[in-house]
Amino acid sequence: MLFDFFKKSKHTNDPTVKKPRAVAFVDYDNWYISCEKNFHQKPDIKGWRDELSRRFDILDILFFADFTNASMRQEISRIREITNSIIETQNSSSHYKKDFTDFIMLDHIYQRAFTSNDIDTYIIFSGDGHFSSVASFLITKCRKEVGVYGVRDSVSAQLANTASWIEYLPREDERDRKLSYMLLRNLKYLSDNMEKKNARPTFWATVDAAAKYNGESRQELAEALRRLIDKGYIYQTEEAVSYGKKRKIKVLNVRWEQVKKDGLLKEIA
């Protein structure tokens, strides 16, 4: 399978080369729930659409989801910023609600395959293995390219192995930048309120505070903080403190000018 997208995909970012025509089918139940569960963030719909537009001539983007949930209904306005092709997959049955979304989305993909000859690439945004069969059909029978987008750590191996290429979101650099923002925001708050709080930020106290406030992984935040130290944005100094008895602790210090220059305190949506 073609996992190295940039080296092996047919399309290119060269503006002089005609872009492949593509249609994208988005299992938004999967994208939204996986992002919330794994990374405590909402999908970057516009950023993803902009990425597609740079690579493809987008004929249509279709979103499929059960929008009966209040939090999902709020997503409709965000989706409408990039497309009006929104397919409600609500199922009145109390069983197989998620599979119903898959069923409707599969039906639309097959219909498009049988009725449209102007599509070069089919893009499927989902991690469900149910889509491996249609991906195989499009590649082997229709001679089309099938790209898969999926949330990191939430993609079926069967689907990943069937696709022509696969991209995982959020990207590692985007994830690291978001974690760095959380840590630096906590350190900025302490810096601005140092006298009032009478606190000195240490490594694990900062990690624990950011993890608790943001509901994030303690281990991932610790790794992100180590990277900030390795890159020179943060350094540690020893300070003497008196908490019952005198001792020395390692305190975090931030090079705020460098942080500001590199835009690390700009939040990622």
Image (cartoon, grey):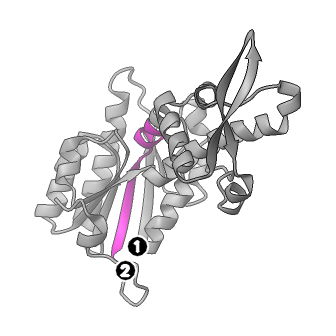
Q: Residue sitting at 44 percent across and 60 percent down?
A: 61
Q: Which residues are magenta?
A: 20-35
Q: Residue at x 70, y 62 (%)?
A: 261
Judge from the rendering whether residue 49 lies leftward or rightward of residue 235; answer left or right: left
Q: Is residue 7 above or below residue 1?
A: below
- In the image, 266 versus 9, the foreground residue is 266
Residue 150 in the figure: left or right of residue 245: left
Residue to which mark 2 is pinned: 19
Residue type highlighted by circle 1:
Arg
71 over 93 or under it: above or below:
below
The crowding category of the residue bearing disc 1, from other C-alpha atoms within 10 Å (few below 14, some 14 to 19, many at least 20), is some
Q: Residue furthest top?
A: 244
Q: Residue furthest toward the left?
A: 140
Seen at 55% across and 37% down, the residue is: 72
Q: Are marks 2 and 1 in contact (CB under 8 Å)?
A: yes
Quick one: SS at disc 1? helix
Looking at the image, residue 143 lies above or below residue 109: below
In the picture of the structure, the residue carrying the numbered disc 1 is 55
**Quarter holding the N terminus?**
bottom left
Give amino acid for label 2: Lys
Whether 267 is among the magenta residues is no
